[in-house]
Amino acid sequence: MLNKIAFKIPIVFHSRPYKAVAAGIVLFSSRKFGLPLSLRKVVKASKLKTKIVNRCIMKLKSIIPETNRFVARPVHFLEPITTRVNSDQTTKELSKILLERIEAHPVLSGEHPTTIASCAIFLASLAAKGKNLLIEIATAAETSKTTIRNLYANLYPYRFDLFRNIRFVD
């Protein structure tokens, strides 16, 4: 990817700090290779302001061809979060099923993929284990537990649609 845009970097980013340009390139390349990083994590590692990194990302989007763009979906965040939380196989499978059903609902407009994946894992852990792992899931996903709880509250009226035809084996 860097080879395709290397000749444009001095022209497009003439007034931007190189650290911010590097942070944007790291973000795009990590998403392309299936290890999505959140913008918050990249900003924290680069120790720059979010506004500067965001502007560099917008410039990168303008010079990267459409075929190379990667849109982060909740499915991409599901596996890393469940691994960090040490979820069992039942919870992982149930969270995948719930995530597919959650993505179909119109309630999720404007929600971040990490939040959606975290909420699916939270619902699956409640259903499979009966345990409230909200704090562990929030720290693993690097989001606030209030954000996950708010999405859970938005999805609560649809709980019967989400859990339809799911059988629990103990």
Image (cartoon, rainbow, N blue to C red):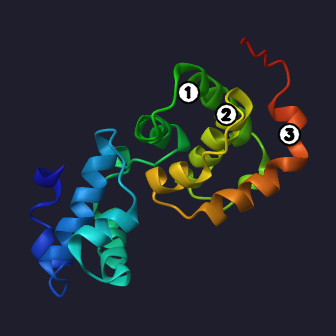
Looking at the picture, which amino acid does disc 1 mark?
Lys
In three-dimensional space, the C-alpha distance between marks 1 and 2, rounded to whole angstroms, equals: 8 Å
Task: Give the secondary structure at mark 2.
Answer: helix
The residue identified by callout 2 is 124
In front of the other: 24 or 117? 117
Looking at the picture, which amino acid does disc 2 mark?
Ala
In front of the other: 87 or 98? 87
Quick check: 16 left or right of 109?
A: left
Q: Which quarter of the figure has residue 63? A: bottom left
In three-dimensional space, the C-alpha distance between marks 3 and 2, rounded to whole angstroms, equals: 12 Å
Residue furthest to the bottom in view is 15
- The x, y position of residue 162, in whole percent, is 80, 34
As drawn, the label of residue 159 is: 3
Q: Earlier in the sequence, mark 3 or mark 2?
A: 2
Disc 2: CA contacts within 10 A as few (<14), some (14-19) or many (>=20): many
> Measured along the vertical axis of the image, is residue 90 above or below residue 67?
above
Task: Give the secondary structure at mark 1.
Answer: helix
In front of the other: 34 or 6? 34
Residue furthest to the top in view is 169
Image point 36% across, 48% down: which residue?
36
- The x, y position of residue 150, in whole percent, is 73, 62
Task: Give the secondary structure at mark 3.
Answer: helix
As drawn, the label of residue 29 is: none
Looking at the picture, which amino acid does disc 3 mark?
Arg
Image point 64% across, 63% down: which residue?
147
For the residues labelled 1 and 2, say whether their Cβ atoms are less than 8 Å apart. yes
Camera-near label (3 vs 2) is 2
The residue identified by callout 1 is 92
Disc 1: CA contacts within 10 A as few (<14), some (14-19) or many (>=20): many
Q: Earlier in the sequence, mark 1 or mark 3?
A: 1
- The x, y position of residue 5, in whole percent, is 17, 59
